Image (cartoon, rainbow, N blue to C red):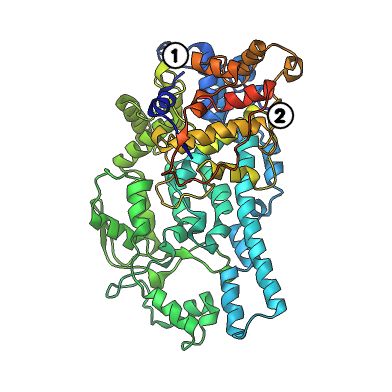
Amino acid sequence: MRRLAPSIVLAIAACSSASPRASIPVPERVAVDAFSTALRTQTADQQVLHALSRLTFGPRPDDEARVRAIGVDRWIEEQLHPERLDDARADQWTGEFEVVQKTAAQLESEYQNPGALVNQLGARARGGLTREDSALLRQARQNLRRIAEETQVSRVGRALLSDRQLQEVMTDFWLNHFSVFAGKGIREQYYLADYENRVIRPRALGKFRDLLGAVAQSPAMLFYLDNWESAADSGRPRLVDLNAPAARRAVARRFPAAANPQSPVAQQVQRRLRAGLNENYGRELLELHTLGVDGGYTQQDVINAARALTGWTIAGPRQGGGFTFTPFMHDAGEKRVLGHTLKGGRGIEDGEELLDIVARHPSTARHIAFKLARRFVSDTPSEALVSRAAATFQRTDGDIREVVRTIVTSPEFFSREAYRAKVKSPFEVVLSTLRALDAQPDRSPRTAQVIASLGQPVYGRQTPDGWPDTADGWLGTGAILNRINFGLAVAAGRLPGATPLAIPGADALRQASREVQVDAVVHALLGGDVSPVTRSVLLTGRNPLLDAATPDASSQMQPEPMTARPQRGLAQIVGLALGSPEFQRR
């Protein structure tokens, strides 16, 4: 891998400078605070481009004209109410995927877990698998692979096609805030699409407490952070004694293979039920999901939060899957969290009250307000904006729509400093490219593989803190080179569904002068506003970033699979524009 000169890296980091569509109703005229509007320092054209770059995954060719026609504030109001927008095109495309049609419980029930099948087959075939057993195992693995691929493809496709773009941006935000990892274990693959489609997206602009509760009871989160097997520590009272007949019957229903108490499965189940408290979810609930790392909680708060959530687990496929509360796992003792006492002798109410407490805590309001302001405005949002957004959160009892409205209609959002102030993530780079070229989604996993090759595999963040949302997380030397090569690969026609000559008026531009072609590409892809350096690159066809690159012996990256030699003519200009600092920012 080649290393960029430090000055080049600093320069790019500091840079600031059609298919048929569903019919969308135009909302009533929006009353906008005249004083707030007067404080906006972006030009009218910049406001349109800025709103489209922040509240969508990038504009399609006809989006700018529509926003100008109805006004940027009316368009923002429209996006704040996705329930009013027809999204039939995205619904139809994603609805053909089995992972979208079926719940997680249905998938887990209908498609056998390959790991469980290995154990089952191994118990009866110590000397090796029969041909029939091998075929069963092969089919189970193929089914799991298809589920994983459909989960990624359907997410990318909806983000590309949806006319509810702000809802998709917020879905991405919350999937990152409440991050889960596909590689946690085989069972996680069954849960991811359900998590996205039935937990996150419907609540992305709703009440934070509702979203938090749905996440807390989702198999995806319960499995990822191990709460599904968290139980009262030895010596602490359980709501139902583990040795009580009712508990034994419940265990037998949940784990039929453990009916024989002497069997290895039964012994494994008993060990798990007696393993005690797991603090993972209790810790991340406070540190990442609500109060924030500096939110004022203690280690004892973490422990007691985890105790309140014991027994919040996942039902087996035979019991319908999904969330279930298991009394014989629950710590029934009194608990004190963040100054509040949770009375002893209760069950699921402990966890519900805990979620009420943390969802309405002032530190949570500030933490969520800061993260949303950072997502929509800049890597370092002003204290004034964060305070106003946090006040909205508290005044509206955590109404996410109103917090977002406070941020995206603010003078800070429409300030000159905020224009092109955010670096796109790899997911945003690829999606904005596809949308700019009016591309259609690909039903194969190739687009998701391209996103992964740029450094952000879909559902591939191993740690619960989510992907970076600041420039320093995405502007390493190798990442910049990969983004430039990505643009050249698009010019060579190597991005599924994207045609580099799909910009408006491409046919008429084929025989035009290089300067005319550059002007057209700058207008179509870069908002008509580029630096002298970028214009020189587009006119000459030479990118100084690549020329300045030197071998990087320390890089752990493999040769970029999207690398391609630049094309000539209009396609080359498009590819260079897609790799430019202006396109890499939003």
Q: How many labels does the image show?
A: 2
Q: In the rendered view, tell whether residue 571 sits above or below residue 190.
A: above
Q: Quadrant of residue 517?
A: top right
Q: Label 1 sits on what residue type?
A: Thr
Q: Which residue is drawn at 52% across and 16% down?
A: 530
Q: In the rendered view, tell whether residue 387 sits above or below residue 557.
A: above
Q: In which quarter of the image is residue 16?
A: top left
Q: With 185 as the anchor, is 39 left or right in this view?
A: left
Nearest to N terminus: mark 2 or mark 1: 2
**Residue 524 in the image, given as x and y percentages of width and height:** 63, 19
Q: With 49 as the anchor, is 42 left or right in this view?
A: left
Give the number of the disc on residue 37: 1
Q: In the rendered view, tell whether residue 501 sits above or below residue 103.
A: above
Q: In the rendered view, tell whether residue 527 sits above or below residue 123.
A: above
Q: Which residue is drawn at 44% across and 39% down?
A: 552
Q: Label 2 sits on what residue type?
A: Arg
Closest to the observer, 210 or 37: 37
Closest to the observer, 125 or 216: 125
**Residue 151 in the image, given as x and y percentages of width and height:** 61, 51
Q: Residues within 10 Å of mark 2 (few under 14, many from 20)?
A: few
Please identify, in this view, whether the residue under mark 2 or under mark 1 is nearer the observer.
2
Local SS, label 1: helix
